[in-house]
Image: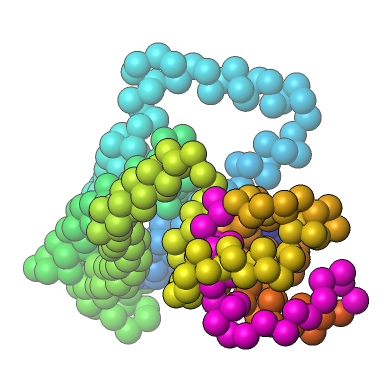
Amino acid sequence: MRQLTSSRGGRVEALRAAAFAAALVLTFLALGSQLSRLSGFLFSAHMAQHLLLIMICAPLFAAARPARLIFRVLPLSARVWLASCFRWRSARLLSFLFSPIAIWLYFIGVFAVWHIPGLYARALDDEATHIAEHLSFFLAAFGFWSVAFGHYPARALSPGARLLYVAFAAVASALPGALITIAPRPLYAAHRIGATSFGFTPLEDQQLGGLVMWIPGGFLYMGVVLALLLLCLRAAESRATLRRASPALALLLVGFGLAGCDDEPAANLLAKGAAPQIEGDPQRGAKEIEKIGCGSCHTIPGITGARGLVGPPLMSMGRRIYIAGLLRNTPENLAAWLRDPQKIVPGNAMPNMHLSAEQRRDIVTYLMTLR
């Protein structure tokens, strides 16, 4: 079990490392490749850049959980300082600011505010504002997906709550893309020259950008919602299975409890009642035991003079678990032992008495009464 847990933990860490590496590569493609230069000319390319940051890079970073790795590699003094910073969240206001509801509002608010035409134009004209735009996109999205994946806060939301969390975000974030797509005139004058140089009208470029925000993002949200729905269904199925099994489990527990109330061990109860009985006459069996002389080797209750010490005493024979330490104690096995003990355990001290089937039946019936 320990090896299985270790193997599973290793696979999880490998997947997180792969997610982190993929996030780094895609972030470089979003911010440092030809797409970044193209986003200065085309509104549609800029929306593709935003989509890549919010819907691909941030979820991959959230899935990788890099904070744990970063915290591990920091020196002790830095860890202590960070821990003291996180203690500030004990205040009610700061606790709310880091709550899932607040993070959801940041995510939707940042997405909507930065697409207001005036603020969008300022971000294009000023590099510092542009960096702040992308940084706020990433941080808000990272927090949102950390909550959606159940990594934050410490008491994570249930799968059902996370499903609603993502579903409402999908609806809210689709609204800006839809409005931009159906707008009757160009809203982003900064891309007029760039769109014309690439053969688009400003309105066509804007509509394409709105569709990029609206459709691919909607499919990504839908995938996460379906995954969370599957988790909810599995959880509900597990609860339903447990409810269906509860009556049976209760009956089993009651049965075990009642069995435990008996003074006799469970194995003795099995020997007492579970094995089929051979029908014979116990009185005739006692007489046969006296006539054969079994008492010269065994101590047998109810048999006159049966105080032999060669073989084992036969007290409580009907409650014993094994015959000769080998055969399960059932009437059939005891009859087989009496028929030919040397065949079962060669060289043992008990000779073959050449008993008839009727004699064996009667002797077995008597011995099974000894409890």
In the rendered image, residue 361 lying in the magenta stretch gets the answer yes
Residue occupying image coordinates x 31% and y 77%: 196
Q: Quadrant of residue 156?
A: top left
Residue occupying image coordinates x 14% and y 62%: 179
Q: Residue furthest right?
A: 347
Q: Nearer the viewer, residue 134 or 92?
A: 92
Q: Position of residue 99 (x, y in %)?
A: 35, 32
Say if 316 sits above or below 277 in the image: above
In the rendered image, residue 152 lying in the magenta stretch gets the answer no
Q: Nearer the viewer, residue 227 or 43?
A: 227
Q: How is the image coloured?
A: rainbow
Left or right: where does residue 283 sit relative to residue 6? Answer: left
Q: Position of residue 57 (x, y in %)?
A: 50, 60
Residue occupying image coordinates x 34% and y 18%: 93
Q: In this view of the protein, can residue 148 be seen by the observer?
A: no
Residue occupying image coordinates x 51% and y 58%: 369
Q: In this view of the protein, can residue 233 be seen by the observer?
A: yes
Q: Quadrant of the N terminus?
A: bottom right
Left or right: where does residue 349 sit relative to residue 289? Answer: right
Highlighted magenta segment, given as a residue range: 347-371
Say if 259 sits above or below 232 in the image: above
Say if 346 sits above or below 297 in the image: below
Q: Position of residue 341 (x, y in %)?
A: 77, 78
Q: Nearer the viewer, residue 66 or 262?
A: 262
Q: Position of residue 298 (x, y in %)?
A: 76, 57
Left or right: where does residue 279 sit relative to residue 66? Answer: left
